[in-house]
């Protein structure tokens, strides 16, 4: 059963949905205070993002549509990304956001990290 977890990244609340070892990250929340040029849709339009998503889809045998999901309205609205895709997007935003996202994913699945 999936569980919603919310972590604080330097004052920004970021939601994670955890189901076993699968984690989805609400990247809309990661980019809330950033410019339009840094929004998820901008990154998703890049050649690098498309190639990364295609590779993860093949490697994990997960449909591309399941790796990135945009939800409008409701309790869990926003752009949700599979963990590996979310980390790549977060690193594109900044090294610090990438590190926070990666550590947040480890925390929600119960992996010990050294900070």
Image (spheres, rainbow, N blue to C red):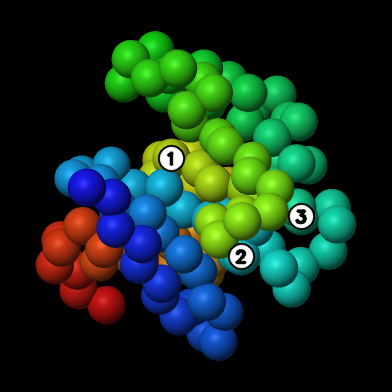
Which residue is at 45% across, 80% downward?
8
Q: Is residue 32 left or right of residue 24?
A: right
**Distance of label 1 from label 2 (alpha carbons):** 14 Å
For residue 49, above or below residue 22: above
Tell me which label, 1 or 2, sits earlier in the chain. 2
Q: Are marks 1 and 2 in contact (CB under 8 Å)?
A: no
Residue at 69 percent across and 35 percent down: it is: 44
Looking at the image, residue 26 lies above or below residue 21:
below
Is the C terminus in the top left, top right, bottom left or bottom right quadrant? Answer: bottom left
Marks 1/3: CA–CA distance:
18 Å
Above or below: residue 47 compared with residue 1: above
Q: 95 or 25, which lies in front? A: 25
- Disc nearer the start of the sequence (1/3): 3
Q: Is residue 24 visible?
A: yes
For numbered disc 3, what is the local secondary structure? helix
Q: Earlier in the sequence, mark 2 or mark 3?
A: 2
Label 1 sits on residue: 82
Q: Which residue is located at x 37 percent, y 54 percent?
A: 17
Distance, label 2 to label 3, CA atoms, is 12 Å
Residue 76, image x and y in percent? 54, 56
Number of disc labels = 3
Residue that label 2 marks:
29
Residue matched to label 3: 38
Specify whether 65 is left or right of 5.
Answer: right
């Amino acid at each position: 059963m999936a569980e919603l977890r919310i972590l604080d990244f330097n004052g920004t609340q970021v939601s994670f949905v955890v189901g076993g070892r699968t984690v989805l990250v609400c990247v809309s929340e990661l980019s809330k205070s950033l410019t339009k040029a840094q929004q998820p849709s901008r990154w998703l339009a890049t050649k690098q993002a498309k190639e990364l998503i295609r590779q993860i889809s093949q490697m994990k045998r997960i449909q591309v549509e399941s790796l990135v999901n945009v939800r409008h309205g409701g309790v869990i609205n926003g752009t949700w990304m599979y963990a590996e895709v979310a980390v790549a997007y977060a690193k594109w935003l900044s090294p610090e956001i990438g590190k926070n996202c990666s550590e947040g994913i480890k925390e929600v699945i119960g992996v010990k990290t050294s900070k």
